[in-house]
Structure formats: structure tokens, C-alpha cells
Image (cartoon, rainbow, N blue to C red):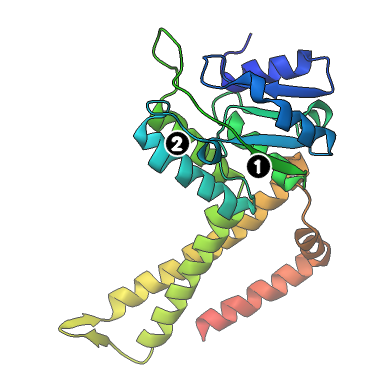
Amino acid sequence: MDKGYGNALMGGIRAARGRYVAMGDADDSYDFTTLGPFLEELRDGADLVMGNRFQGGIAEGAMPPLHRYLGNPVLSFVGRLFFGSKIGDFHCGLRAFNKESIMRLGLQTGGMEFASEMVVKATLAKYDIREVPTTLSPDGRTRAPHLNTWRDGWRHLRFLLLYSPRWLFLIPGLVFMTLGLIAGIALSFGPVRVGEIAFDVDTLVGAGAAMVIGFQSVVFALLTKVYAMQEGFLPRDPRVERLLAWWSLERGLVLGGLLALLGLV
């Protein structure tokens, strides 16, 4: 039996016999008698209904200040920015969903990042996702929680980055290429002085390196996107499919030759 938060939940979801499944931390921090609104949203057609602790209320001592004011808000913001999600609390432990819809997502992570994976994949699949305000109370455990702030926070952030080639590779690559191009053009006319500091040939070498690194990052973003689409990690993107349909060896050789000529000039 595989250990971990995500593995435990997937085992329970597979074993569930009902049409709808509700999940929540069994440590007295959530009130399961308030699941009525969740069920109403599911019956109204929602695929996934998330609780939002920041809307419903967090009791004193229920959430560490680092999680409340930094960890959860930052990771939820990153999730909204990267994937266009409207969910305000990515990591709320109380949620309910249509079992069939969630099983179609092919959730794979076995750790705490399972909470993010469910929201991200449901968003990418264009599911009907809704939020219901919920409350969070201090837990009633007699032992320390398994959650590790920095380790599990990094696992959530790593997952969000790996599922977004645009923000991990494409945008940084375009920024590097733009900065390298601007610096290269400026230095092609001679040294550039800012006060007593002169930018010359050494800076031009750095600008060239930035161009190369940026270009490779952009290409890697495309390759990562194609691989993720083929393996089913990310949904199919019509823009990428059109580009692949247009691309050929001959066109690649022509484009590469033109870029080489442009670089020589």
C-alpha cells in the first residue's frame, strides 16, 4: 500500500460507491454537517465544489500565520495566474465532487500536492468548479501534524510550475531573448556608458548568451508542451497542434539557415 495524502485519498475515491464524494480532514477542523451547500451545487451541475476558508472564517489558532498570510495566499495566487482558475483557496481540505468527473482526470500525485493537482486538472479540463464558504477550527489531534511547511509548500509550487511550461520556460525565455537583443543592438554601435560604468564587449558576450539561453528555453517550452499533450498530462492545445501540422524538416532547415545568416550579419 502506497503511503501519502494523495494515495490515501485516491484509494478512498476509487472505493466510494456513490455518485458524489466529499473529502475532508478528519481532525475536527471541518464541520461535516455543513456539506449541504456542497451537495446543492453538485446537484446543480458542478463537477467540483471547493470550500473557501478565507471567505467562511478561520478560527484563532486554526492555521499557522505563515500558512494563512503567506503560503496559502501565494500558492493560490500562482494557481490563478498560471491556469486562469478563479478558486481563492486551492488547498482547502473540505471539498466535494462528482466521482466520475474526477476519475477522468487521471490524478497521479501521491503527496500533499494532490490538492493542487485536482484543482489544476479540473480547471484545464474546463470543469464547472464552484466555491462555498467554509470555516476552519483548531484541529483536535493529540499528535503533531504530518504537514511540513517548506517541504510540502515546495512540492505544491513545483507541481504548479511543471504543469505550466509557459511560466516555467516560455516567458523567462522570451524575457532573456528580449533583453539580449536590446543589449546587443545597443552595443553594436559602440560602448554604452552609464555614469562611470562602461558596457562593452564583455557585456555583448553576455547579451549573446542571453539570446541563446532564451531561445533554447522557448524551444524547450514547446517540446515540453508537446510531450505533456501526448502523454495526457495537459489537454490538447489547438495552437500547438496547428504549429506541429505546419512544421516540417524542410521548413526547419530553412528557418535555421535564415537565423544563422541573420546572426552572421
Quadrant that contains the N terminus: top right
- Tell me, yes or no, if residue 220 can be seen here: no
Determine whether, in the image, residue 92 is placed left or right of residue 210.
Answer: right
- Residue 158 percent location from the top left of the image: 51, 40
- Tell me, yes or no, if residue 29 can be seen here: yes
- Residue 143 percent location from the top left of the image: 40, 9
- Residue at 64% over, 72% down: 256
Residue extending furthest bottom? 189
Q: Which mark is residue 154?
A: 2
Lower sequence index among marks 2 and 1: 1
Q: Mark 1: which secondary structure?
A: helix
Does residue 169 sit above or below 177 in this rendering?
above
Q: Amino acid at mark 2?
A: Trp
- Residue at 75% over, 40% down: 231
Residue closer to the observer: 32 or 185: 32
- Residue at 41% over, 35% down: 67
- Residue 224 percent location from the top left of the image: 64, 50
Residue closer to the observer: 119 or 167: 119
**Residue bearing the label numbered 1:** 120
Q: Amino acid at mark 1?
A: Val
Q: Mark 2: which secondary structure?
A: helix
Residue closer to the observer: 92 or 218: 92
- Residue at 37% over, 26% down: 61
Q: Which mark is residue 146?
A: none
